[in-house]
Amino acid sequence: MTNLHILKKPVYYSTAYLCTAAIIGLAAIYQPILSVLGAAVLLLLAITVHEPARISYPVLLSTAISVNYIINTDLFGIEIISLYKLGILVLLIPCMLQNGIRLKLVYPILALAAMLFITIFFSDWHPRLSASLSLKAFIGLALPFVFLLIEWKKEMAQRHIQIICLLPLVSVAVGLLLQLAHLYPFLDVEFTGAVRVQGANIAPHLAMLAFLGITIALIETKRRPEKAKFFYFTLAANFAVLIATGTRGPILAMLAMIAYYFFDIVREYVKGKAMLIIPLLCSLALLAAAVYVQWDNMTKRSFERQTGTGIDLSGRTEAWAFFLKGVEGSPMTGRGLGSVTVANDGSLYKGFVVPHNEYIRFYYDSGYIGCGLLFLSLLIVFASIYRVLAPSIKVYYLAFIFGFFLYSFSDNTLSTVQFIIPFCWYLNCLYLQSRLIPNKEDVIP
């Protein structure tokens, strides 16, 4: 009887897979992109059933692609980005069950839950805000912070860090394939004439991936010197990608880290580490080449239009003023979690679904109280990680976190998949690996 049950189980799986494959085949006639997506999901589900741990790699790699821009459609009335977030959570549930979770870094999720509570009982609801929209905003914003909680194995955590550093290159490679298949343009040409590489994203999202790839590689070259060649390669490649996107915010956000990197490498060179002259000269050459190649693009994006600020901020100052004015009547509790996404009444460019400033975004949603709770929770998480780090990388880490806070002034760092998921994933891996070797140089043997 037991043997018969064991024999039947693979038959059930095979039948389910065959039926699903038939449906995908029929869908290919009408919706080829959705059918490809369905085939990928089917493959991932098969991997999840048999190898739960391995599913983390394709899930992490998927953040290199802005699916909501490439697949510009809804499915059963549900936005594709919402389905994507739900899908990666479902795929990782077996991973969580296998590896376990820890609640040490759960504070951002609790803060968002408090913001939802404030919305229900105290906020001055925006006329277009609904309870379902607020709940959807909570789930979408809280989900990336789940990646702070998973207890990855040591070897897997290190592979994840390396994958994060490769995400910009994956986006570029997939973007080229999409361009060849005439499914999505590899380049974006703005009205100013500036040409921006966007890969399998939009240029700002690719820039987010590149920012993380560069700053994380800088930390890892110090933390894992035996892997320095790999991280120096990804650092240089990601810097080239970042410059090609023509995005200004991440460049400004990483200036503190780059300045300390040059200071640190010169200091070590003076102490007698002569081989460091190679990465030093290569870094200077890369910076000079970047300035030369992108000077015209940056000039067009910054000074093509005459603005009151003197520098073209792509409409951000107007958007910030609009959202700040909209919350004037409820500064303590805001207009409700998710209300910022329905606040643009057509007065602003349609791209400003949110204000491209996370401080204003959460101030609008939950006022001083909710916004304060969220960023306080982030500070607690960052401090918890800082305490377990090796002394040699603590300044790099502080510069990394400073860059995050600075970047959040000009873009949607907490609400864009291409930033927040790899960011949380890396912080978790860094915490896990540093905790394994407390008070020592954090080098994995």
Image: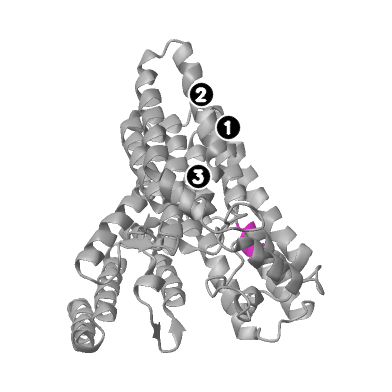
Q: Amino acid at mark 1?
A: Val
- Tell me the amino acid under the disc marked 2: Asp
Q: Which residue is mark 3?
A: 251
* Residue in front for this viewpoint, 365 or 382: 365
Task: State which quadrant residue 13 falls in.
Answer: bottom left
Q: Position of residue 323 (x, y in %)?
A: 69, 70
Query: For mark 3, does the 10 Å Cα neighbourhood hold few (<14), some (14 to 19), or many (20 or more) residues?
Result: some
* Residue behind mark 1: 395
> What x and y, as percent, mark residue 197?
35, 56
Q: Residue at x 34, y 58 (%)?
A: 61
Magenta part of the chain: 106-111
The label nearer to you, 2 versus 1, is 2
The image's mark for residue 264 is 2
Question: Of all residues shown, which one is farthest toward the top?
Answer: 272
Instruction: Give the Cα separation between the discs numbered 2 and 3.
Output: 19 Å
Taking the image as shown, residue 91 lies to the left or right of residue 401, namely left
Name the residue nearer the viewer: 18 or 206. 206
Res. 155 visible in picture = no
Q: Secondary structure at mark 2?
A: helix
SS class, disc 3? helix
- Contact between marks 2 and 3 (CB within 8 A): the answer is no
Sequence order check, earlier mark of 1 and 3 = 3
